């Protein structure tokens, strides 16, 4: 066989080889995980049983099979955002929900594994709620001095922000109030039985536990809007809080047609860079596609929107989440 003939035959083979490599790269990019369908049990850290995180996780579990039929979501209870981040970074859970301020603090404090945290989506905002009995003299957080105040559990996001709100009001949570570290599953009952004078809660609107409390006893919501400027003066740790208004119909029996000024912070769907790409893409898709169905039961979830879901500061998006958003980009 002549040299020119051999060279002529090698040329198409080289071209075919290059095409095969290009095709393989494209398939690897377009089908995360090499096209393998995720399966097995996946742990999802939520929160206290009567909180919005737990309700959201339960409804997501019911919807996940549409996107990932071979995945079974196992829900893990927790005290809230801070413990949720501990569970994800330690590998006890693959996914969780956490407030952006808690995530930022976790990273700023260089907690173990914090550099591995990644986001899948911005979900909905938590609204800070200060609840007192009807007739209470409390009109602002500064009036809580000397009172028994529910602050949320110690590893919760509400405890983090409540301490900062008190500081903005000129109070020290360790000295100026009698802090009671209980979750939303216990604080309403303690208020009803006069074992605490007030409690803070950070959650989506409405929160079922507060709705249930208002059906049994007369309560008031205290405005926190007067603290926004002072809160922002505590930056950078308070940079993720914004001024917000609880709409008049959030708790109709309580608000009697009046909106309440307060502070809000975004919630993020969080994982780590260790989580499988295809699994993360599927989880992100499930969250966005089930917004309307989950929103029928958890009103806060109606705020989940594909256009804003990518804004996950202070965390970068996980690669699987980025792939999902690219796949649905108009």
Image: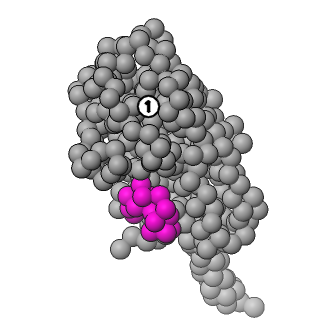
Q: Quadrant of the N terminus?
A: bottom right
Residue located at (49% from left, 47% from top)? 212
Q: Secondary structure at mark 1?
A: strand
Q: Is residue 236 visible?
A: no
Applied colour scheme: one colour
* Crowding near the residue tagged with mark 1, few <14, some 14–19, many ≥20 C-alpha atoms within 10 Å: many
Displayed quadrant of residue 33: bottom right
Task: Quickly name the residue at label 1.
Answer: 200
Task: Name, please, the residue furthest toward the top.
Answer: 175
Quadrant of the image occupied by residue 301: bottom left
Q: How far across and how far down the image is residue 271, in percent?
A: 59, 48
Between residues 217 and 163, which one lies in front from this camera angle? 217
Q: Is residue 223 left or right of residue 175?
A: left
Position of residue 56 in the picture relative to residue 302 (left or right): right
Q: Quadrant of residue 313?
A: top left
| Residue that appears at 37% across and 18% down | 144
Number of dots carrying numbers? 1
Residue 229, relative to residue 95: is it above or below? above
Q: Which region shows up in magenta? A: 290-306
x, y percentage for residue 330?
35, 74
Along the line of sight, the residue nearer the viewer: 163 or 16: 163
In the image: residue 285, left or right of residue 140: right
**Above or below: residue 183 compared with residue 140:** below
Up-down relation of residue 97 to residue 284 (above or below)? above
Q: Position of residue 5 (x, y in %)?
A: 67, 90
- Left or right of 129, for residue 27: right
Res. 39 visible in picture: yes
Residue 301 belongs to magenta span: yes
| Image location of residue 111, percent across then percent down | 58, 27
| Residue sitting nearer the eye, 33 or 16 | 33
Say which residue appears at 45% left-offset and 63% top-offset: 295
Q: Is residue 127 magenta?
A: no
């Amino acid at each position: 066989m002549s040299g020119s003939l051999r060279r002529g035959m090698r040329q198409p083979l080289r071209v075919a080889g290059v095409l095969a490599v290009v095709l393989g790269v494209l398939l690897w990019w377009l089908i995360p995980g090499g096209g393998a369908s995720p399966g097995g049990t996946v742990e999802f850290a939520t929160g206290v049983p009567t909180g919005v995180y737990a309700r959201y996780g339960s409804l997501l579990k019911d919807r996940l099979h549409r996107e990932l039929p071979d995945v079974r979501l196992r829900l893990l209870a927790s005290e809230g955002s801070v413990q949720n981040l501990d569970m994800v970074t330690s590998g006890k859970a693959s996914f969780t929900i956490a407030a952006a301020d808690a995530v930022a603090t976790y990273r700023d404090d260089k907690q173990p594994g914090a550099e591995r945290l990644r986001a899948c989506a911005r979900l909905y905002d938590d609204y800070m709620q200060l609840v007192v009995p009807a007739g209470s003299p409390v009109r602002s957080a500064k009036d809580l001095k000397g009172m028994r105040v529910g602050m949320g559990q110690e590893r919760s996001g509400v405890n983090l922000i409540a301490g900062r709100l008190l500081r903005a009001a000129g109070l020290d949570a360790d000295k100026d109030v009698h802090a009671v570290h209980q979750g939303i599953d216990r604080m309403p009952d303690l208020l009803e039985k006069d074992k605490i004078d007030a409690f803070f809660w950070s959650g989506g609107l409405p929160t079922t536990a507060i709705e249930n409390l208002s059906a049994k006893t007369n309560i008031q919501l205290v405005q926190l809007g007067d603290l926004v400027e002072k809160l922002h003066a505590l930056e950078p740790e308070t940079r993720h809080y914004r001024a917000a208004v609880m709409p008049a119909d959030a708790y109709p029996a309580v608000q009697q047609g009046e909106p309440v000024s307060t502070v809000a912070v975004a919630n993020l769907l969080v994982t780590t860079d260790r989580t499988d790409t295809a699994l993360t893409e599927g989880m992100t898709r499930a969250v966005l596609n089930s917004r309307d169905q989950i929103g029928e039961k958890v009103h806060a979830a109606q705020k989940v929107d594909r256009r804003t879901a990518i804004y996950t500061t202070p965390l970068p998006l996980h690669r699987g989440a980025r792939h999902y958003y690219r796949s649905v980009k108009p």
